Amino acid sequence: MSAIGNEYGNAIFLLAEEEGKLDEVMAGLELCRGIFGENAQYVDFLETPSIPIEERLEAVRSAFDGKMPECVTDFVSLLTERGYIHFFPDCVETYEKEYNRRFDIAIADAVSAKPLDVSERQALRDMLERKTGRRIKLNCEVDPELVGGLVVKIDGKLYDGSIRSRITDILEEMTK
C-alpha cells in the first residue's frame, strides 16, 4: 500500500463520513475501480502529461458526472490533476478497509470446486455471519482441483472443508 493511497483514501473516507455518504461513495469507488480495471487505456490517457490537463479533466467529467457521487468524480479529477491517478486502486483499498472496519465487515474468500449459485452463496454468507458475529462480504472463486467441498479464508484463518483436504488427511493417517 502506498503512502499516497493511504493519505488520499483516508481523506475521501473522512469526507464521505462528514457528508453522511459512506455507502454511496463506496459504491461509486467500486464502480470506478471496475471501469479502470476494464479500461487500462483510460487510466493511461488520464496520466499522459502531453495531453492538456483541461482535456483530461473534461474526460473525467463527461465519463462520470451524474453516474456516481459528485465527490467521487471530484476525487478522480483531483488524482488526475495531481498526477496520482495510478494510485487510485490503493486509495480505494484504504477506503474499503476503513469502511469495513466501521461497519464490522469481514472479507471471506471462498473457493469451491464448482460455481456456487445465489442460494448457496447466501447460505454460506449466513452461516459465516453466525459463526463470526460480523457482516460478511463474500468473494467466490472456482478451483476444479478441489474435487468437491469448500475452502474459506476469513481474517487470515483458513477453513478447509474440501474433499482434496480430506483425502490428504486420510492418506497421511494411512502412512503413519
Image: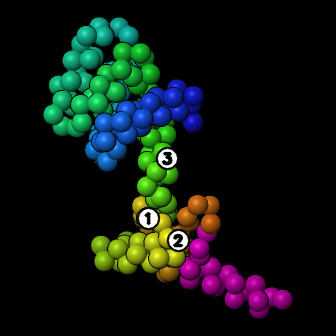
Q: Residues within 10 Å of mark 1 (few under 14, many from 20)?
A: many
Q: Mark 3: which amino acid?
A: Lys
Q: Is residue 143 visible?
A: no
Q: Position of residue 29 (x, y in %)?
A: 34, 40
Image quarter (top left, top right, bottom left or bottom right) of the N terminus? top right
Residues marked 2 and 3 touching at CB (< 8 Å): no
Q: Quadrant of residue 64?
A: top left
Residue 62 magenta: no
Q: Quadrant of residue 28?
A: top left
Q: Residues within 10 Å of mark 2 (few under 14, many from 20)?
A: few
- Give how far apart the Cα atoms at labels 2 and 3 are: 18 Å
Image position of 159 (left or right of 68): right
Which disc number belongs to residue 97? Answer: 3
Q: Where are the magenta residues, as a range?
A: 158-176
Q: Residues within 10 Å of mark 3 (few under 14, many from 20)?
A: some
The residue that disc 1 covers is: 136
> Is disc 2 placed on a helix, strand or loop?
helix
Q: Mark 1: which amino acid?
A: Ile
Return the residue nearer the eye: 3 or 44.
Answer: 3
Image position of 157 (left or right of 30): right
Residues marked 1 and 2 touching at CB (< 8 Å): yes
The residue that disc 2 covers is: 132
* Residue occupying image coordinates x 38% and y 10%: 49
- Give how far apart the Cα atoms at labels 1 and 2 are: 9 Å
